[in-house]
Amino acid sequence: MAAAEQAVKQAGAVGDGVSFDRRNTDWYIDKAVQGFVFLGGISAIVFIVGIFVFIGKEGLSFVFETLDLTEFFTSEYWEPSDEDEPEYGILALIAGTASVTGLAMIVAIPFSLGAAIFVGEFATGKTREALKVLIELLAAIPSVVWGFIGLVIMNPLIIQVFDVPVGLTVLNAGIILGLMAAPIMTSIAEDALKAVPDRYREAAEAMGATRWQVIYKVVLPAAKNGLLGAVLLGVGRGFGETMAVLMATGHAVNIPGSVFDSVRALTATIAAELGETAVGSDHYGALFTIGFFLFIITFIINLLADLVVRGVRKG
């Protein structure tokens, strides 16, 4: 009897040892996965810092050694290829970028808000799923395809409808950029509307409010921070877009007086001129300074949008 009890104890000890070994294996696997995820997150931060350092190194050296910042930000003349007196003024480029982005938001906000309200508040079942897939597909269209649409379709259409000599204008680029920004703005706006508790809607309906009154007077005010985040993300997308803006604006250094003027954006200037610029030249440094300026602006806009959206989700 004693021998049997001793054998049972030994078997239990072995079993405990096997179980302990299994827990150790699972623990190591779990730690390895955590380390991999942590490494991925750190690598993203390292890449961002590396980009910031690279752009800053190339651009800031030109700023401190050669560039006149007052002229850089207040002059509307961008003539870096002038051998006698090159001029590096980005005021016209900033005006072009701001005008295109502003018009894009005028186009995108009604479309994205209307789509978000319909998908989040009215559509149900398969209709909602189909619309969400369609919105995601629109967001996946490459910017060069949108640029071709602006160049081949919108350009002759604007010339014919408005009787203007050129259709590659602020209007063209604003419409294209607005359509490009609308899908991401719609997705964020829909999330903001979903974050509004259902009890708000139920209380308003119990007081006799119609469906539209619930949306207009209850849901939209409660989701205003999330909607602001969607707009900020759209602005960041518009400010940093390159290829579609390059193809649809006409690429003329000009402070626009109307939506039918051709302009040049900051991003388009870098894309068009960097490949033909001598490394280490003043022109090269000026382009990297523009890139550094764009990086700071888009980083701030996207950071603000992320903080607003995170605040909505936590709320």
Image: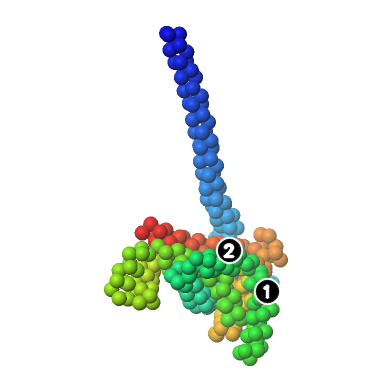
Q: Secondary structure at mark 2?
A: helix
Outermost residue, left direction? 207
- What quarter of the picture does the N terminus occupy? top left
Mark 2 nearby-residue class (10 Å; few <14, some 14–19, many ≥20):
many
In this view of the protein, can residue 141 be seen by the observer? yes
> Residue drawn 35% across and 73% down?
214
Residue at the spot of label 1? 148
Please tell me whether mark 2 or mark 1 is closer to you in this view. Answer: 1
First in sequence: mark 2 or mark 1?
1
- Residue 93, compared with residue 25, is above or below; it is below
User: Residue at label 2?
Assistant: 291
Quadrant including the C terminus: bottom left
Q: Nearer the viewer, residue 180 or 117?
A: 117
**View extreme (top): residue:** 2
Q: Secondary structure at mark 1?
A: helix
| Residue 297 visible at all | no
| Position in image of residue 70 (x %, y %) | 51, 70
Give the camera-side residue of 141 and 275.
141
Depth check: 118 or 71 in front? Answer: 118
Amino acid type, residue under disc 2 in the picture: Gly
> In the rendering, at what x and y percent does residue 238 appear?
55, 70
